[in-house]
Each structure stands twice: as structure tokens, then as C-alpha cells.
Amino acid sequence: MLKVFRIFFGGYEPNHTKLQAIGYVVAMTPKPIITVLNTNQGLGQIKGFTQKKGVIYPGVEVSAFKRSDKTHLWTVRSKQDGSYAFRNIAAGLECFVVGFDPEQNYNAVISDKVVAK
């Protein structure tokens, strides 16, 4: 008998109960599985912190773009400690990162020529 497995690849925390109810198998792995679907993806990461006037500032929407053609790669929100991380980016890919003030009191902040490591 052939058994079919459904695999969930989401960019957010899944609802395990709901996924199991519709036939998905929940398999916990010690490390996240990285899938490479195009040349912009890989084992590289970009990490940083969000601050406002030198003070840690959580909840900031941060986006990464491929510098050469302005392709949007990922958007994340900074954690309570102000940290953010983009993963599954091709190592060595040159990017620019944009942070947006959630209160809209300040203009966007851009870090240019950031290289995924």
C-alpha cells in the first residue's frame, strides 16, 4: 500500500491540531529544514536589531531585497528584544534591508550592501 505524506512549508507558526485534522503528519526536527527553490535561496542568513534613537525597538516590520534587481525576498517582524533574522537566503547574496516604523513617526531606515552569510 502506498502512503502519501503531505508536507507543510509555511512562513509562520502552524496550527498543528488543524494540520493533523486535515491529514498532515507533524514531524518535529531538531533544526529547520531549508528548501532551495530558486537562486536567491540557500543557507545564508541576515541578522540585525531594530532601534529607535539608540533604544531597542520591537515589532518593526523589516524587509530584505536582492540588491541587483530589487526582488523582494522576505519580510519579518523584529522580536521583543529588537532582533530580526532572515534565513534561507543564498550565501553571498548582496541585499538591502528596510525597516518600517510601526507608529509611522519616522521614515523607513535602509541598510544597503548587506551580504548574507
Image (cartoon, helix red, strand yellow):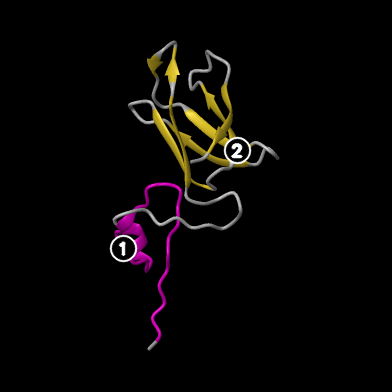
- Mark 2: give few (<14), some (14-19) or many (20+) Cα within 10 Å: some
State how many labels appear.
2
The residue under label 2 is which amino acid type?
Answer: Glu
> In this rendering, is residue 2 above or below 78?
below
Question: Farthest residue toward the bottom?
Answer: 1
Which residue is located at x 40 percent, y 20 percent? 57
Q: Position of residue 19 (x, y in %)?
A: 36, 60
- The answer to whether the residue labelled 1 contacts the one labelled 2, judged by CB atoms less than 8 Å apart, is no
The residue under label 1 is which amino acid type?
Answer: Ala
Q: Which mark is residue 5?
A: none
Which residue is located at x 52 percent, y 26 percent? 99
Q: Position of residue 52 (x, y in %)?
A: 44, 15
Q: Which residue is mark 1?
A: 27
Q: Along the polypeptide, which appears first: circle 1 or circle 2?
A: 1
Which residue is located at x 33 percent, y 27 percent? 80
- Mark 1: give few (<14), some (14-19) or many (20+) Cα within 10 Å: few
Which residue is located at x 58 percent, y 42 percent? 93
> In this rendering, is residue 56 above or below 10?
above
Q: Which residue is mark 2?
A: 94
Spatial CA distance of label 1 from label 2 is 34 Å
Q: Position of residue 96 (x, y in %)?
A: 59, 32
Q: Nearer the viewer, residue 3 or 113?
A: 113
Q: Position of residue 58 (x, y in %)?
A: 39, 24
Taking the magenta stretch, the answer to whether it contains residue 49 is no
Q: Which span of residues is magenta-colored? A: 2-29
Q: Nearer the viewer, mark 1 or mark 2?
A: 2
- Where disc 1 sits, the SS reads loop
- Where disc 2 sits, the SS reads strand
| Image quadrant assignment for residue 1 | bottom left
Seen in the image, is 92 located left or right of residue 60? right
